[in-house]
Image (cartoon, helix red, strand yellow):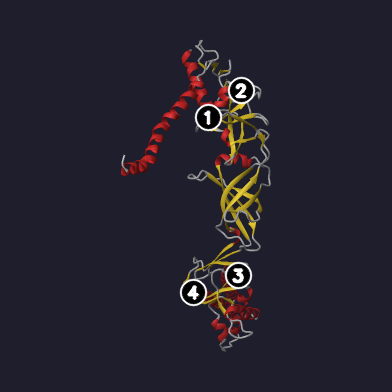
């Protein structure tokens, strides 16, 4: 063999070895499976006599007589399958109901500020801006913007409203006519005493006074319904008095504010929305600002409908712990569940659970994702087992239990998963199966469950049960 041939052989030798291993690997795996399958051929407990199979002179495992869910396995098969058991423990983690959700603005502390009359925006409220100061001791102001803090009653905007001006003028006119009609009635009453006029004239004057009084009250109630202050209404009355006294001197300051409409903050909070600028024509349906009190936020969490009975069965008050998903290591927030929604979302099949959390420092933000945890009372029937002990096929969850540690026999038990992590499952025995059949045999604390080899036991038990049915 030349140097070239030896070089090619050395080059392709790893490839040939890999292909051989790939071809032989299924053969080896199939042989191992066959040996295990032979080792687990069962003999039915009450079935017709079957010639027992033997492996190197040893009898294979079999079902326990009279129990279709319990089987006895020889020691050498236990070793071959690597069957291991672990004691079930009482749940060492407090039970809780976990809900996902988010923070939101408190609807009871969210104001949509709109004008009482249509008008043109002539001024936007301002606040001091120390950062814009160019001279010592000077604090210039800037217009309000998103995120600014405002106080209760602070000026937000000024509108010029012709509707308000017209209604004020109507009020002045009603007051003036009432005063004139009252003076006329007084003169007629004096003339009636002197029998200079008929009584009918006095009655007509009284009727005119009553009509003017009704007109004044109607306009005044309209102004009050528009939430004009007593000071503003008093100013209009003063204008009427001035006109009655025939003082024709014009009050330019009053004229400039005659149609002036001020929009003020209903309470202290933060500007979370601003939709106005000077020159805009605003209507009574326009939201000029949105003011929110961020010192208290709402919590909206979602609970699955199958968990609702658990929550509704808890005693009041319902307390929960809220954590931010973005900062799970932060100090948890505590609160009380205030309301459980009556409507199930048709898409997510969840109900809304609502409450509030305090936010005095302003660290929380509306819209942040949260996880809410509701503590549940201890369940005496709940135990903790390794997740490797669980066998789930979509319809049911089962485990294998070793009732007597001195015997290598294993019994199938149905369980209901309460919650689980990647390593531990918390289970309890179900009252009934999927078809309504009764279930028994609860797993108790200290009982041995198969934590390794459970899948092999399950497959072999099914094969044995099928063989027993066929032999009848």
- Label 1 secondary element: helix
Which tag is nearer the camera, tag 4 or tag 1? 1
Q: Residues within 10 Å of mark 3 (few under 14, many from 20)?
A: some
For mark 1, what is the residue?
A: 455
Q: Residue at x 50, y 67 (%)?
A: 284
Please tell me which of labels 4 and 2 falls first in the chain.
Answer: 4
Mark 4 to mark 2 CA distance (whole Å) = 84 Å
Please tell me which of labels 1 and 3 falls first in the chain.
Answer: 3
The numbered mark at residue 149 is: 3
For mark 2, what is the residue?
A: 408
- Label 3 secondary element: strand
Mark 4 to mark 3 CA distance (whole Å) = 18 Å
Mark 4 to mark 1 CA distance (whole Å) = 71 Å
- In the image, residue 93 sits, relative to residue 148, either above or below, namely above
Which tag is nearer the camera, tag 4 or tag 3? 3
Query: Looking at the picture, how far across and down is residue 110, in whole percent?
Result: 58, 62
Please tell me which of labels 1 and 2 falls first in the chain.
Answer: 2
Mark 1 to mark 3 CA distance (whole Å) = 64 Å
For mark 4, what is the residue?
A: 277
Q: Residues within 10 Å of mark 4 (few under 14, many from 20)?
A: some
Q: Nearer the viewer, residue 443 or 235?
A: 443
Left or right: 200 with respect to 8? Answer: right
Which tag is nearer the camera, tag 4 or tag 2? 2
Q: Quadrant of residue 222?
A: bottom right
Which tag is nearer the camera, tag 3 or tag 2? 2
């Amino acid at each position: 063999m030349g140097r070239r041939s030896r070089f090619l052989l050395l080059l392709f030798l790893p490839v040939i070895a890999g292909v051989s291993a790939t071809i032989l690997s299924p053969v080896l795996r199939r042989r191992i499976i066959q040996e295990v399958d032979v080792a687990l051929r069962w003999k039915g407990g009450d079935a017709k006599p079957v010639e027992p199979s033997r492996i190197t002179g040893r009898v294979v495992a079999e079902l326990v007589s009279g129990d279709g869910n319990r089987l006895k396995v020889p020691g050498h098969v236990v070793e071959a399958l690597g069957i291991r058991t672990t004691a079930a423990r009482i749940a060492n983690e407090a039970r809780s109901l976990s809900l996902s959700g988010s923070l939101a603005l408190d609807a009871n502390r969210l104001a949509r500020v709109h004008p009482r009359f249509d008008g043109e925006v002539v001024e936007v409220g301002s606040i001091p801006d120390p950062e814009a100061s160019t001279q010592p001791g000077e604090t210039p102001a800037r217009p309000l913007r998103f995120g600014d803090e405002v106080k209760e009653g602070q000026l937000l905007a000024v509108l010029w409203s012709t509707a308000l001006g017209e209604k004020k003028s109507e009020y002045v006119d009603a007051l003036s006519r009432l005063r004139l009609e009252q003076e006329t009635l007084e003169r007629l009453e004096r003339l009636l005493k002197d029998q200079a006029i008929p009584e009918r004239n006095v009655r007509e004057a009284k009727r005119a006074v009553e009509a003017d009084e009704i007109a004044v009250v109607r306009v005044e109630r309209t102004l009050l319904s528009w939430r004009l202050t007593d000071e503003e209404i008093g100013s209009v009355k003063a204008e009427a008095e001035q006109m009655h006294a025939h003082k024709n001197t014009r009050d330019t300051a009053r004229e400039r504010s005659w149609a002036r409409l001020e929009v003020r903050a209903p309470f202290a909070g933060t500007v979370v929305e601003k939709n106005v600028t000077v020159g805009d024509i605003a209507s009574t349906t326009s939201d000029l600002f949105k003011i929110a009190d961020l010192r208290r936020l709402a919590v909206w969490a979602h609970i699955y409908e199958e968990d609702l009975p658990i929550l509704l069965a808890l005693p009041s008050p319902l307390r929960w712990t809220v954590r931010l998903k973005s900062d799970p290591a932060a100090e948890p927030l505590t609160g009380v569940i205030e309301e459980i929604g009556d409507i199930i979302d048709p898409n997510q099949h969840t109900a809304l659970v609502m409450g509030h959390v305090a936010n005095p420092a302003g660290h929380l933000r509306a819209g942040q994702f949260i996880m809410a945890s509701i503590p549940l009372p201890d369940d005496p029937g709940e135990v903790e087992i390794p997740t490797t002990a669980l066998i789930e096929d979509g319809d049911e969850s089962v485990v294998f239990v070793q009732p007597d540690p001195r015997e290598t026999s294993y019994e199938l038990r149905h369980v209901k998963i309460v919650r689980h992590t990647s390593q531990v499952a918390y289970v309890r025995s179900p009252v009934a199966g999927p078809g309504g059949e009764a279930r028994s045999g609860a797993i108790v604390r200290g009982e041995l469950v198969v934590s390794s080899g459970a899948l092999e036991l399950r497959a072999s038990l099914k094969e044995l049960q099928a063989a027993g049915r066929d032999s009848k």
